[in-house]
Every structure is written in C-alpha cells, then in structure tokens.
Amino acid sequence: METRRLGRLGHESSVLIYGAAALAQVTPDVAAQAIQDVLAAGINHVDVAASYGHAEVRLGESMPDLRGRVFLATKTGQRDRDLAWRQLAESLDRLRTDHVDLLQLHAVGSIAELDRVTRSGGALEAAVRAVEEGLAGAVGITGHGPHAAQTHLEALRRYPFATVLTPLNRALWSDEAFRTAYEALVDEVRRQDAGLMTIKVVARRNWPGVGAGEPLGEQPNTTWYEPLVEPEQVRAALSWTLGHREVTGLATAGDVGLLSLLVDAESNRMPAEQAEALLAADPGYASPFVAMPAGL
C-alpha cells in the first residue's frame, strides 16, 4: 500500500487510515478479525475516538499485537480542559497503552466550536499538556460539516496543529465556496508542513428520508451517511481523492463491511478524469452535509 509523509511528524502513513468508528458496535470476534484484516492490508495508521462506542475497548483488546505496528490516533470531543484531560486518561486505559501518537480535538467544524476549544481553560490546553507529559506525540484537529475547511484554516492561525482531518470528496469539490475554502486551507497546511488527512471520501449522500437533526433508523450501513457501495464507484471516489497529492491519507468508512472495497480500490486506481466522469453519472451523488442527522 502506498504511504505518504504525515507532514512534519515524518511518519510514512498508509494512504488508507483505519477509521475505527467501524468497531463501535461489533463483537470482540468481529473486531479482532477486522484488525487482522487492517494489518494484512498494510494499513499502519489507526484513527479512533473516545466517543466511538466500544471502539477503543476493541482496539485495546488487540493492542499487544497492534501497538508497535501502527501510528495510533485518538480524539477528545470535550471542550473544557479538565474534562478533556480526564477523557484522555480514560482513552489510554481503554486502549491499554501509555500514550497515543496523536491526540485530536474532535468535531471542530465551526468557529463557535473552535472558540470553545482554544479559549483559556479549553481542551487545547489539555492536549498541549498531554504532549508535554509524554501521553501524546502531537496535537491535531478534526471536523466535518460545510464550514470545516475555513474553521481548520482559522485553527492553524491560532495554534500550530500537527495534523488536520477535514472532509473532501468530488461532490463537495463541486461547490465553489467549499473549493475556495479548501484551497486556502491547503496553502496554510503546506506553509506549516502539517499533515492533511480527509474524511467522507465514500459518502454518497444523506440517508433518504432522514431530515436534518433527525435520528437515524435501521439503515443497512453503520455510517451516518449513505455510502458508495458499488466497487467501481468506491474505486472512483478513492482515486479522485488520492489524486490530491496534498492529502496524506483518507479515513476508511465506519462500517467493517466496507474495508475490503477500499483496500481493493487503493490497489487498482483509475485516472482522475475517469473517476470524475463515473461519479458525475450518479444522479444521487451529493454532499453529506445537506441534512446531517441528530447526534453529530
């Protein structure tokens, strides 16, 4: 599997980053097999969060085999310093490790959320302390939503985050405002030599029938958006995104059943022009941020 340098951190991360949200509700046996599939595929970067159900626990169960083989990132969704510090301690306990390689401030997709984490007494102070005390190797920031790119640009102006995890796919790119904000973010990422990772690569659209702020029902996938599931469409989406050389890697979808599609697609990419045409031919392909469900 191709690897790319994770900015100034220097880690050669696999271009597929395992999105361990997929482990949120699975059994220990399913999780153990998924983790073995991750390692067999050549994935060496795992991304999880305290809020991902049982995901940290499931990773912790495999940590003796996993820890020395992957770059391990987790996230805190807390906004206050003391609560974020406590959550990190809980994450380390669940993960059965004494440190993570990256601690990310989670779901910061608006300036209002950025203000909360960067204020005096905010979660950023806990993350910086974690680095100083050896509990985390670096501090990153994540977020989704239509304003994530401009929010993450402002975040880099306030603090030199080592990594940014922000959304990108062909549907989002077609919006001029999104594209302009993303390109400005890329310029700043390059200036600071931060690592730029991305999410929502295989999002097809919002789940039909689920309005903004409404709960999900019995959808066939565990992702909060309807994913692309046709192999050629997945191949096109991945090929288009990895054609952006500023992207160091993309987080795999939060469903254990989709990993093999992404692994196959990574090893069999198509030209960007072909990928774009294939995605454009799908009348249902759209931004997943039009009607985001409850709980996000």
Image (spheres, rainbow, N blue to C red):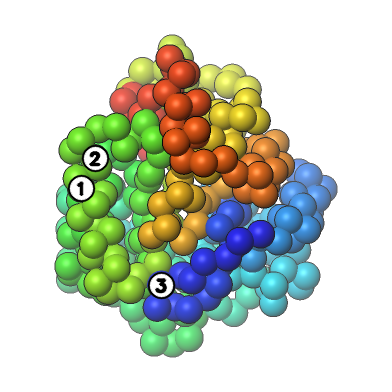
Q: Mark 3 points at which residue?
A: 7
Give yes or no for contact between labels 3 and 1 (Cβ–Cβ under 8 Å): no
Q: Is residue 136 above or below residue 246?
A: below
Task: Give the Cα separation between the discs numbered 3 and 1.
Answer: 20 Å
Q: What element carries label 2?
A: helix
Q: Quadrant of residue 94?
A: bottom right
Where residue 67 sits: x, y (%)?
Answer: 68, 73
* Residue at the (78%, 70%) spot, across then down: 65
Q: Name the residue under label 1.
A: 181
Q: Nearer the viewer, residue 261 or 242?
A: 242
Q: Which residue lies furthest to the top in this view?
A: 209
Give yes or no for contact between labels 3 and 2 (Cβ–Cβ under 8 Å): no
Image-based side of 45 in relation to 285, left or right = right
Whether residue 63 is visible = yes
* Residue at the (48%, 78%) spot, across then down: 10
Q: How many labels does the image show?
A: 3
Give yes or no for contact between labels 1 and 2 (Cβ–Cβ under 8 Å): yes
Q: In which quarter of the image is the N terminus?
A: bottom right
Query: What's under tag 2, amino acid-wise?
Result: Phe
Q: Residue 251 carries which label?
A: none
Q: How crowded is mark 3: few (under 14 residues within 10 Å), some or many (20 or more)?
A: many
Q: Is residue 278 above or below residue 52?
A: above
Q: Mark 2 points at which residue?
A: 178
Task: Give the Cα separation between the discs numbered 1 and 2.
Answer: 5 Å
Q: What element carries label 1?
A: helix
Query: What's under tag 3, amino acid-wise?
Result: Gly
Query: What's under tag 1, amino acid-wise?
Result: Ala
Q: Which of 127 and 227 is in front in this view?
A: 227
Q: In which quarter of the image is the C terminus?
A: top left
Q: Which of 201 and 118 is in front in this view?
A: 201
Whether residue 28 is visible = no
